[in-house]
Amino acid sequence: MADEFPFEISPMFEGERIRKDGMYAELAGPKSKGFELVRAADMSEVEDGKFTLIGPDISDMEEGSRYPLAMVYKIAGELVEADLESIVERRNHEFQNYIQGFMHLNQRDDVWMRVSKDAVEKGMTSFESVAKAIMMLFKNELPFIEAVEAIYITDEAEIDKEIDNARAVYKARDDRTRDLHDEDVDTFYGCTLCASFAPTNVCVVTPDRISLCGAINWFDGRAAAKVDPEGPQFAIPKGDVIDAESGEYTGVNEAAERLSSGEYDRIKLHSFFEYPHTSCGCFEVVGFYIPEVDGIGWVDRDFAGTAPNGLQFSTMAGQTGGGKQVVGFLGIGVNYFRSPKFIEADGGWDRVVWMPKMLKDKVLNDIPEDMRDKVATEEDATDVDSLRNFLKDKEHPILERWVEEEEEAPEEEEATEAAPQAGFAAPQMQMPANFMPSMPMTGGSGSGGVKIVLKNAKVSIDKVIIKKQD
Amino acid sequence: MAKIIAVTGKGGTGKTATTSLLIRHLTKGDKVVLAVDADPDTNLPETLGCDTSKTIGDIKEYMHEERDNLPPDINKESILEGKLYEILEEMPGYDLLVMGRPEGSGCYCYVNNLLRGIMNKLVTNYDVLIIDAEAGLEHFSRKIFRNVDDLVVVTDGSRRGLRTAERIRELVNELETDVSNIYVIANKVTDANRERISSTAEELGLELIGMIPVDEMIVDRDLAGEPLFDLPDDSIAVQEVERISQKLGL
């Protein structure tokens, strides 16, 4: 099949680097400009196999020269739709690299190509042969493409005219992609890169939940799993929905059991308190429950100070990490703040009471508008008391929980072993043995006494003075 | 498959000078060479007379900083590969890659994983890969380079230098990197210490494949901050490195 082309075509040439010494011409790239674009069109608008070149051809270029290059492919077919454009466009990278003596790097308006001296000597003197080979590969490998036409542009003025249009197409696509949610897909992705130091860690990456390290989104998982399904990123079939709000799926629970070697069999992707996601150790941010205000604070790796619970990131990270489900703490990637499902099971942003200023500023636009001034930072509150006052001043929605608890408290008091502090009650959950509540737990307003239960605690005190309150 | 040579040793022993003379030798032939500066403390680019500014550390940082701003479905491996090609300094006969600064405080597992894949592919384009590596062999423990054919430890005449060679040999055994051969090159050798070095090496069971004499031309250039790459053929150090290259099959 390759006889009609003056070059070899094979996947074995992928990764072939054309060095400056062996280069005939450089196209687009960091020192020039260009782009690649695939557009879906009607059958009537595409003349199958047609190639148009605007500007000089390879044979017009001097050895060692540099030119801009744009490559536009119009595709048509009964099954061709706009959503497929980016998938086809990405294949241009792969297919051009199949061509011996042609190097393609990057994508979109960052593309960077080189043609080798050897290839030109052997007859690659026209872009037409390159474009025809790519069109052939498109049709062979992607059978839904019934007709394809290519337009290559090496004329700089012409590229300048078209490049903004291409960028607008990329942007529209990105906006559509960002709108992808857990309910739109049937596969999530797992990652075991942290498994060596967090053996029971179960990292589940979904459209609405970035990996804890912040590096791997759902698309990265998909790309990696496609190339190497046995590699560190792999598919997790979503299975059936158990609970959409908290993000519990049969497929995820099965994967949790497998990946944690039976340690965990339930994970709720968007829950802080109940069966939370495990925390590896690489997480960018750790969330911590503040029982006194019944809210959740978040602190990131870059914040060197102390959170209102009296702890630093490193201390909390040490407690949370290791691939465990730790109720009361949760490791996340910064981008999870941007998720519409951000701790949905626990009230989302309405439950957030504190974060370092730098972190808050970073995600400010993603905080619901009415909540932006209600989340305290270290400038507003450095301990629980000042936090409580801040939340009251700002009428944070967390106050509603305090009221509810106050109303419920008298009935519950007898029944509950560790009576929640009226006014700032703990949620209905089992605290883990190593959970560190902020001290002191002083009596709240109107409650008839305090009962403190310490489990697995070692307490050494030099002196305790207990006085009757005046 | 490219032959992979790593040159390492205690700081100040002349490991970078030796590396650049090995590269000098290699580029005289028709082999295509990838030179890697994997020691943030050295100055292989200056020693080679090559002006380079961006490093792998910089692009890892770029990937780290920009990851939330990149198009969500962009292929990050392809971005990283493109960036790596951008910082690859293309010199006549060889390319130079600088590993650069150490990682920040975040998690680099993912980007390192991508980098391993890209490096594996990149290396196939060369006949020889020569790495100027710090003595801790950090990039090897991170498996950015998987296998090493020849690990060359450069030492000065001191017993301490040779002890370092011994320690590096122990370290290699702990790494998951495959190292086929470990050799030692003694540098800054004088008539006064020549015998002593040989016998100490033998005593420690180290395979000494060359003794580079103190070369006034190198001393002068080091003082003036001039590259060593264009040392004349009659430099005594160059001549010894030629002999060493033959032993290494270069």
Image (cartoon, rainbow, N blue to C red):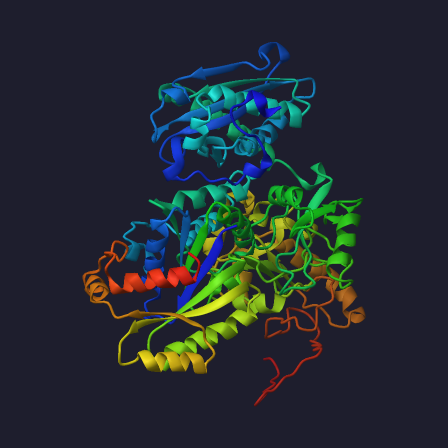
Q: In which quarter of the image is the C terminus of chain B?
A: bottom left
- Residue drawn at 30 percent across, 80 percent down: B193
Asked if one can make out residue A362 in the rendered structure from this viewpoint, the answer is yes
Q: How many marks?
A: 0
Q: In this view, does B209 lie above or below B246?
A: below
Q: Nearer the viewer, residue A34 or A48?
A: A48
Q: In this view, does A469 lie above or below A259?
A: below
Horizontal side of residue A7 vs A144, given as left or right: left
Q: Nearer the viewer, residue B172 or B87?
A: B172
| x then y, percent, for residue A380 | 47, 59
- Residue drawn at 62 percent across, 61 percent down: A280
Q: Quadrant of residue A265?
A: bottom right
Q: Is residue B104 above or below residue A56?
A: below
Horizontal side of residue A266 vs A195, given as left or right: right
| x then y, percent, for residue A221 | 63, 45
| x then y, percent, for residue A244 | 75, 45
Q: Which of A95 and A31 is in front in this view?
A: A95
Q: Which residue lies furthest to the top in this view?
A: A44
Q: In which quarter of the image is residue B237?
A: bottom left
Asked if one can make out residue A82 in the rendered structure from this viewpoint, the answer is no
- Residue drawn at 56 percent across, 33 percent down: A98
Horizontal side of residue A197 vs A240, given as left or right: left
| x then y, percent, for residue A437 | 63, 71
Q: In this view, does A20 lie above or below A443?
A: above
Horizontal side of residue A195 vs B247, given as left or right: right
